[in-house]
Image (cartoon, rainbow, N blue to C red):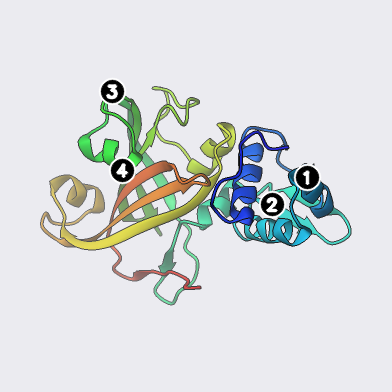
Amino acid sequence: MSTKPFNTAPLYVQLRTDLARRIARGDWKRGENIPNELELAREYGLSPGTVRKALEWMEETRLIVRQQGRGTFVATASSEELNQRFDRFRTGVGEGLSLDVEKIDGGVFEPSAQEASRLAITAQSKVYRTTRVRTARGKPLSFERLSVALSMFPSLSEGHATYDLADLSQADGVLLGHGNESLTLVAADETVARHLGLAAGTRVLLLERTIFTIERQPAEWRQCWCDLEGYRYQVELH
């Protein structure tokens, strides 16, 4: 039975939040079977329909996989599959794009005012900040600066030059949820221009993105300056 009392949110929302929390703390490991709808309904004192609605949402967000005749399992998505949820770069005709990553640097720092605000942490906290360049077909596509709160991802250390958020979230038991982002056309400063092989002042696309956990806590803030000549940024609308 859940140790947290239900509140005024819809019951299926409360249930899916509690089930996600139990997955995050390791009650059910990745690939393991979780109780079926009837068992969960009895445990939580809810109707099977409410349980089904919560599980449908969890399946849509790829937290679980339901297999006919076998049951419901905690998802074991690969790092590549998880990253594709948040990576929208495409070729000029909309096909998938293979990107290589060039590590620049990374380390533990005191947060800037922007980092503290975007990650919802205090100025006394620590962040792990890394910079990198991603290339497509041998040409720089983006220069990126990524930040995460060290308290959320304790497996990070000074020795890391960069990280993979999908792998990191699995290592530290963090369940990624939704993200939001903004796109702005800006003039590349000297640092951005140098890494993208452009002249300073060239107009580039700045993508700012925050990825949240399933419990709506900021997990990562990313700034990405992009030279999209010959490429596109494609988003599916639902």
How far apart, in angstroms, are the residues tagged by discs 4 and 2?
29 Å
Q: Which residue position holds label 4?
A: 118
Q: Which residue position holds label 1?
A: 34
Hey, what amino acid is under mark 1? Answer: Ile
How far apart, in angstroms, are the residues tagged by discs 3 and 2?
36 Å
In the rendered structure, the answer to whether residue 218 lies left or right of residue 228 reads right
| Quarter in which the N terminus is drawn | top right
How far apart, in angstroms, are the residues tagged by discs 1 and 3?
39 Å
In the rendered structure, the answer to whether residue 104 lies left or right of residue 28 reads left
Quadrant of the rendered image containing residue 136: bottom left
The spot of residue 198 in percent (x, y) is 18, 56
Q: Which residue position holds label 2?
A: 64
**What's the residue at 74%, 62% (across, down)?**
49
Q: Which residue position holds label 3?
A: 124
Tell me the crowding category of disc 1: few under 14, some 14 to 19, or many 20 or more residues within 10 angstroms, Cα based: some
**What's the residue at 10%, 57% (across, down)?**
201
Hey, what amino acid is under mark 2? Answer: Ile
